[in-house]
Amino acid sequence: MTDTPPNQSIRQHISRTLRLALPVVVARTGILLMVAVDIAMTGHAGKDELAYLGIAAAPYVMLMLVGIGMLSGTAVLVAQADGAGARAECGNVWRLAMPHAAMLGLVMSLLCLGGEQFLLLIGQDADLARGGGGVLVMFAWGMPAVLMGVTTTLFLEGISRPLPGMLVMLAANLVNAGLNWLFIYGHWGAPELGAEGAILATSLVRWLVLAALLTYAYAMSDSRQYGVRQGAPVVWSRGRTLRRIGYPFGFAHGLEASAFATLVLMSGYLGTAALGGYQIAQNLIAMAFMGAVGLGMATAIRVGNAVGRQDGPGLARAGWTGVGLVILLMALIVVLFEVWPEALAGIYSGDPEVLAVAVPTVMVAGWMLIWDGAQGVLMGALRGAGDIWTPVILAAVSFWLVGVPLAGLLAFSLEVGAPGLMLGMFGGVVAAALLLGGRFAVVSRRPVRRL
């Protein structure tokens, strides 16, 4: 389904963005909801198991987001082709992207297998490194499935069909919770594996998700028109364009994710209770940020459709509509973080030491969400417009020259602890939102050019 002609009203932009975004929000939230359920169920298995999962999740999420960013060109190229009415080209892009996803997944898996050595190298406690390394091994088994599944989801979203990804992820979370019950606690004769059991369950579910998405893509009634089945031969030279879009955005995702992961690793130097409490706040932020991810993807698709139509005014309206919507959404979520921080943190752990760290950190995190959501959607708008390297540079400045140094100063030099880590990153996302907003204002005034 291509977008409608130019000259849409703001009301039409809002309606169409939300129709695309809501299923994407649920689907993306489903990806992290698995991690959230893993953390919550593992937290009730003990403080040490929660720490193992927290220290392992930091590098894993960073690697996963880098991989997703490197594949984000799939949605951009598919959306632009669909906007131009070139349906068969959409499937060609997907069939080109899938081998890229498989190879990236294998590379990321190998990196996960060296997790214990990495954690020891950065100075983590030997027991924490051993436990976290074992969890990273379990993460490794599911990494190729994650990236191939995301690529298929990006293809479906690019042709404005986000609903299948949403439904598959909802079902997957139910299966994941059941398998967690078996493998974390050792019910029904299953081995009691703690944190490793949680991620074993998740990796198994990742492969089931991939199988379900592939089945839908091949079975949809117009799969031939979209070039999924019996499409034109893959134009492998187009891979250069896919990579040209993907590498900088993978780098951008890596900059942000590694900055947040660095703060999780820094919290490990404050002790296991601080690590567990900070990881709870970090996961709550990540869950809330999925609203921004969904709106960012919907905005990128609608901006990409406008590029395909050569519609400059529509490009600008689509981008700023997405920003306005994410600010409203995040403002609502801030209320939850500020009014019920104890209840939110209590979902993950009942340990008093962990909660003493988590509650004030969650409250700091709440005020960060509006700015974080705005910069996430602006990054999506720039991606849809085909703006490649400048947003990466702006992200690098924001997160690594502002956020991380400020976090270290507050947490360690000024002894604010885990809330100081979060407050430092607050400064980073404010800088990112302001810089990316200025960049989109410039890009949206330029002549439209399709990649």
Image (cartoon, helix red, strand yellow):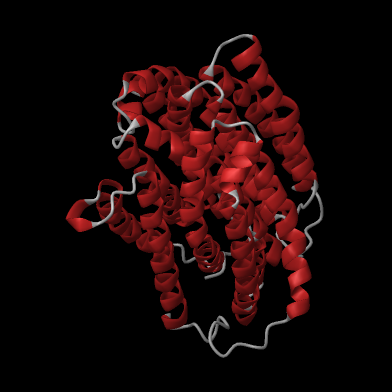
Residue under the image location 56 percent in, 12 percent down: 416
Please provide percent x and percent y for residue 194: 34, 44
| 258 up-or-down from 297: above or below | above
| 308 up-or-down from 384: above or below | below
Q: Out of 9 and 131, give the one closest to the viewer.
A: 131
In which image quadrant can residue 276 be found? top left
Residue under the image location 57 percent in, 54 percent down: 113
Q: Out of 325 and 150, give the one closest to the viewer.
A: 150
Any part of residue 51 in sight: yes
In which image quadrant can residue 44 be found? top left
Please provide percent x and percent y for residue 291: 47, 43
Any part of residue 325 in sight: no
Is 361 displayed left or right of 426 in the figure?
A: left
Q: Residue furthest top?
A: 414
Q: Out of 5 and 194, give the one closest to the viewer.
A: 194
Please provide percent x and percent y for residue 408: 65, 20
